[in-house]
Image: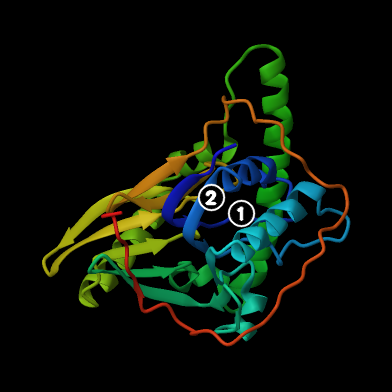
């Protein structure tokens, strides 16, 4: 399969190690692209809900594919989220083309882009409320598992799939207001900092829109997730695009090894931060 060249790809909220993760679909997507820069914007590995009893081969293959991209020349930046917050002790660690950080600011074609996961705005992920958030995460994972079984049954009878969690979010006014407040807060801070783009994850709500305040305007983007929406952000042809995987499209035959991948990462001295991404469309 010929790979599609993309300048920048942003994915978030994959939640590897949970029943809701669409690892096979993500693996298919990763094997179809050749990005210059791959940004993993938090909650890629779900350490909160990690269990030795459940980490399928497809989930391991996603990690292996990311490593293959890095070894093939793709710069990979892992921005930590709340479900993988244990990695924050390794922030600013750099190994070859792979880097871990908590946030990223980069210049892309003369425009400033601010990228972070977004849990900094969520009080439920801090302090004592974190315990409830972890319990809620397990409940959400169970809901997704039940939903998958029901959708499998609906498919047998030729019925359309349905999403319980999306219906809950859409039907609860507080949830809708919380998402709106999240997006508005991120945009207001980005405008104050004079950024042109602000990119988040965390809320599992793919989005691309201009938000305007009395102080200016910014393009707010959210990469969504690979649990329900199966979305990513792509930068090419001098602009950002929201990519959505079509579940109705049959997956091409994909080799998934039953053995754990062997990882061989060679360390070298590299710059800890990306200051600029210069794109040349003249060639």
Residue picked out by circle 2:
225
Q: Secondary structure at mark 1?
A: loop
Q: How many marks?
A: 2
Q: Nearer the viewer, residue 68 or 166?
A: 68
Q: Residue at x 27, y 50 (%)?
A: 209
Furthest-left residue in this view:
214
Q: Which mark is residue 14?
A: 1
Image quarter of the C terminus: bottom left
Asked which quadrant contains residue 109, the reply is bottom left
Q: Residue at x 63, y 65 (%)?
A: 71
Q: Nearer the viewer, residue 142 or 90?
A: 90
Determine whether 110 is above or below 281 in the image.
below
Determine whether 183 is above or below 33 in the image.
below
Disc 2 to disc 1: CB gap under 8 Å: yes
User: Colour scheme used in the picture?
Assistant: rainbow
Disc 1 crowd rating (10 Å Cα; few below 14, some 14-19, many 20+) is: many
Left or right of 169 on screen, residue 178: left
Disc 2 crowd rating (10 Å Cα; few below 14, some 14-19, many 20+) is: many
Determine whether 223 is above or below 25 in the image.
below
> Residue 65: x, y in percent?
67, 55
Image quarter of the N terminus: top right
Q: Secondary structure at mark 2?
A: loop
Furthest-bottom residue in this view:
269
N-terminal label among 2 and 1 = 1
Left or right of 75 on screen, residue 195: left
Q: Which mark is residue 84?
A: none
Furthest-top residue in this view:
157
Left or right of 146 on screen, residue 12: left
Residue 203 seen in render: no
């Amino acid at each position: 399969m010929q790979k599609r060249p993309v300048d920048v790809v942003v994915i978030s909220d994959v939640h590897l190690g949970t029943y809701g993760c669409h690892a096979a679909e993500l693996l298919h997507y990763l094997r179809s692209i050749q990005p210059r820069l791959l940004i993993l914007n938090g909650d890629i590995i779900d350490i909160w809900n990690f269990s030795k009893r459940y980490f399928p081969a497809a989930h391991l293959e996603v990690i292996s594919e990311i490593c293959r991209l890095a070894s093939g020349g793709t710069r990979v930046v892992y921005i930590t989220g709340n479900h993988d917050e244990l990695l924050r002790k390794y922030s600013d660690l750099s190994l070859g083309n792979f880097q871990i950080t908590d946030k990223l600011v980069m210049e892309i074609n003369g425009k400033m882009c601010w990228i972070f996961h977004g849990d900094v705005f969520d009080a439920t992920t801090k302090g004592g409320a974190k315990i409830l958030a972890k319990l809620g995460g397990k409940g959400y994972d169970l809901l997704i598992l039940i939903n998958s079984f029901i959708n499998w049954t609906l498919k047998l009878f030729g019925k359309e799939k349905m999403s319980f969690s999306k219906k809950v979010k859409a039907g609860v006014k507080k949830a809708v207001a919380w998402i709106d407040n999240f997006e508005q807060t991120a945009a207001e801070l980005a405008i104050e900092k004079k950024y042109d783009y602000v990119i988040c994850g965390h809320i599992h709500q793919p989005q691309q829109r201009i938000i305007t305040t009395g102080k200016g305007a910014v393009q707010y983007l959210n990469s969504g997730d690979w649990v329900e929406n199966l979305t990513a952000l792509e930068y090419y042809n001098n602009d950002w695009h929201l990519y959505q995987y079509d579940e109705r499209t049959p997956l091409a035959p994909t080799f998934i090894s039953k053995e754990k991948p062997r990882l061989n990462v060679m360390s070298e001295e590299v710059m800890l931060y990306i200051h600029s991404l210069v794109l040349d469309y003249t060639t």
